[in-house]
Structures are given as C-alpha cells and as structure tokens.
Amino acid sequence: TRQEPQTVSLPCRIAGRFDTRDDIDWFRFEGQQDQVVYVEAFGERLGQWMDLDAAIFDSAGKLLATAPDVVAPQGIPTGGQFGALPLASLDPALEVKLPAAGEYRVCLRDLYGGSVFGPRRRYQLVVTAREPGFFAVAMPANGKRSQGMFVKRGDKAALSVLVVRARGFDAAVEIRAAKAPQGIMIARGRVDAKQVTTPIEIAVAPDASPGFYTLQLVAEADVDSASQAQPVVNTMQIHTGAIRRIDEFVVYISE
C-alpha cells in the first residue's frame, strides 16, 4: 500500500498481481543523488489485456515522473515481416534522474483494474539502474510464414536481423553464426549505429548433403566498454500482425 510499501533493492524484477478492484501496488527503494533509475512494467507484452500505469515519487510524496507507453524505436521498418513485431506497447517505461539521496517509491496500477482483477492479473515490474542494452530478432527475409527455409545446393538465401537498442545504447552490433553446419556458409553482418536491420546471407555449397539443419545467430556489441554477446531470437510469422518465438531456425537443403 502507499502507507506500507514493499521494500526492494536495486536491481530487481518483481512478479506481482492485481487481486482486488482498483488495486495499486507500491514499492520503495533507496537511491543516490544523480543516480539514473530505469522503471519498466510488463503486462500487455506478457499476453494480458492490460494497460499499466507507473509513477515514481520522492520520500515526501512529490511526484517525480510518470512512465509513458513503450514506443517503437525510430527507423524500424513498417510493413513486411517486421511489421508484425510488437515493438510498441501499452506497457510503461521511464528513466528518471534522482535529485537527492534517500527513499523513493514506485506505484503501479492497471487502468482496466476497475473492471478486471483477480489472481490471473499478473505483471512484472523491473526497477534498476540504467543499463544500456539491445536485443536482436531474426526472420526469413522473404516474409513467408515458416520457421525455416528451403535452399538448393549451390544456391543462396537470406535472413533479416533486426536490432532494437534500449536505455541509451547507440553502438554498432555485429551478427555472426554461433556454429555453421557443414556445407553452409553464413556471412557476418553488421548493424551500424544508425541502422536497425541487415540481411544475413546464407550460402549452401554445391556438394552439401541434403537434409535439415538448424541455425543459431549471435549478436555482439561493446556496451559500456564491455563486450556483450547474446543469442539472436528466432521468430516466425503466424499471420499478419502476429509472430511467435521459435527455439530453432531450420534450413532444408534440397538437391
């Protein structure tokens, strides 16, 4: 409650729920002067019909900031296969620079909470120091609704990789294969600082053995002077406006 908020330590990820009508959850943490704190909530992006609203207050109860909805990064292609990615959301996110050392409070509510509530109304709330970062997503470049592609021996195909940068990260991202199956050559790619997507060429040797193969790409970048690598998320389009994450991207080599 506002009178008795739950104490958390940064960084933290909170799993909560709205059990009662117009439920509002409150949390408090200790911050330092000029510390940049990042607050982000997940409801709609977890599959809930939910419009979360988040705000941060100082110890005197003064409102410092309210969190706007997540917007799609500038330069993201519209239409095509990447038009199906849910990069904009009703979920809130904000950064705030703390004016002084002391206690701060975050409150979270669901704007639909007057009519929809109960133990199934689950959310996640992240409160952390600002941590620049990125993630990358791959899809077949042809936009087909498939979790893989067919490539003839001696032929080429392409994957489209989209990089989404967050919380101040603005550097280039390198894309490479985690491990290329025998007979398949996967070109390295680079998404420059002002770019969001790049094609990754997949070439199949003329003498490659026919069959099914799985691919996994890795995205690498220097974040705050430290190298960071993470798997590229594989996705497929179910239908226009809906995508699904898949564990493996499959390439079938045919004669």
Image (cartoon, helix red, strand yellow):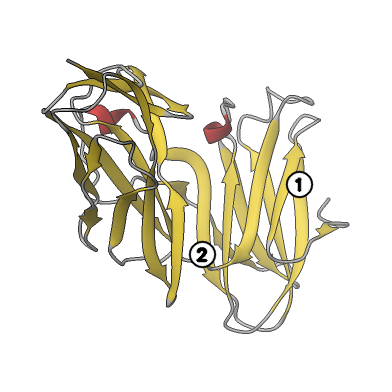
Q: Pointer 2: what residue?
A: 95
The amino acid sitting under disc 2 is Glu
Q: Is residue 108 above or below residue 31?
A: above
Q: CA distance from mark 2 to mark 1?
A: 19 Å
Question: What crowding class fits label 1: few (fewer than 14 Cα within 10 Å), some (14-19), or many (20 or more)?
Answer: some
Q: Pointer 1: what residue?
A: 25
In the rendered image, residue 82, in percent from the top left (x then y), is placed at 27, 33
Kindly check if marks 2 and 1 are in contact, taking CB atoms under 8 A apart as contact.
Answer: no
Q: Residue at x 38, y 40 (%)?
A: 87
Q: Is residue 223 above or below residue 20?
A: below
The amino acid sitting under disc 1 is Asp
Q: Quadrant of the C terminus?
A: top left
Q: Residue at x 24, y 43 (%)?
A: 186
Q: Nearer the viewer, mark 2 or mark 1?
A: 2
Considering every residue shown, the one lying at the far right of the view is 4
Q: Residue at x 20, y 29 (%)?
A: 79
Q: Which is more toward the observer, 187 or 195?
A: 187
**Which comes sooner in the sequence, label 2 or label 1?**
1
User: Quarter of the image holding residue 190?
Assistant: bottom left
Does residue 61 appear in this view? yes
Q: Residue at x 23, y 52 (%)?
A: 188
Q: Which is more toward the observer, 130 or 28?
A: 130
* Helix, strand or loop for disc 2: strand
Q: Which is more toward the observer, 94 or 138?
A: 138
In the rendered image, residue 134, in percent from the top left (x then y), is placed at 41, 56
> Is 176 on the left-hand or right-hand side of 152?
right
In the rendered image, residue 225, in percent from the top left (x then y), is placed at 42, 78
Q: Which is more toward the observer, 19 or 129?
A: 129
Question: What crowding class fits label 2: few (fewer than 14 Cα within 10 Å), some (14-19), or many (20 or more)?
Answer: some
